[in-house]
Image: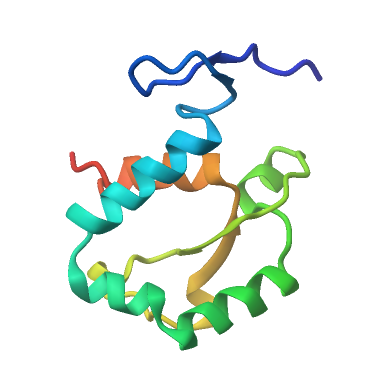
Amino acid sequence: MPRKPLKPCKYGGCPELTEGNYCKEHQALVDSQYNKYQRDKVSQRFYQSGEWRATKKRHLMIEPLCRECMKDNKLTKATLVDHITPIKKGGAPLDENNLQSLCWSCHSKKSAEEGSRWGK
């Protein structure tokens, strides 16, 4: 299946072409700015905890492919572990039944639909 054409990085003045919104360098910058200025401190402490990091690592070993992409018969390596029911909406933070492996693209789409990162 053909891939989508690359598009310019959305970070002002960056000439890099990328599949997503930002090139790797600017995606890391945007994520760090979000974590520093927008993410609430309780969530930040949780996602930096050793318990979460161990759970995430274990889950990615068990489920290494993106669950959403697999629904479309695409094999994409998962890079993130997502809470199916967000913690803020009562989801269990470390329950394996509330976790799913996703690629960056599918996780961003889900977060945008939920309004968890960019608001609605």
Q: Quadrant of residue 74?
A: top right
Q: Residue at x 50, y 37 (%)?
A: 25
Q: What quarter of the picture does the N terminus occupy?
A: top right
Q: Is residue 89 left or right of residue 91?
A: left
Residue 27: x, y in percent?
45, 39
Q: Residue at x 66, y 54 (%)?
A: 78
Q: Is residue 4 left or right of residue 44?
A: right
Looking at the image, is 95 positioned above or below residue 118? below
- 44 vs 116, nearest the viewer: 44
Residue 62: x, y in percent?
73, 74
Looking at the image, is 102 positioned above or below residue 55? above
Q: Quadrant of residue 86?
A: bottom left
- 30 vs 103, nearest the viewer: 30
Q: Residue at x 48, y 48 (%)?
A: 107
Residue 66: x, y in percent?
66, 52
- Residue 45 at least partly seen: yes
Q: What quarter of the picture does the C terminus occupy?
A: top left
Query: Hey, which residue is sitting farthest right in the picture?
Result: 1
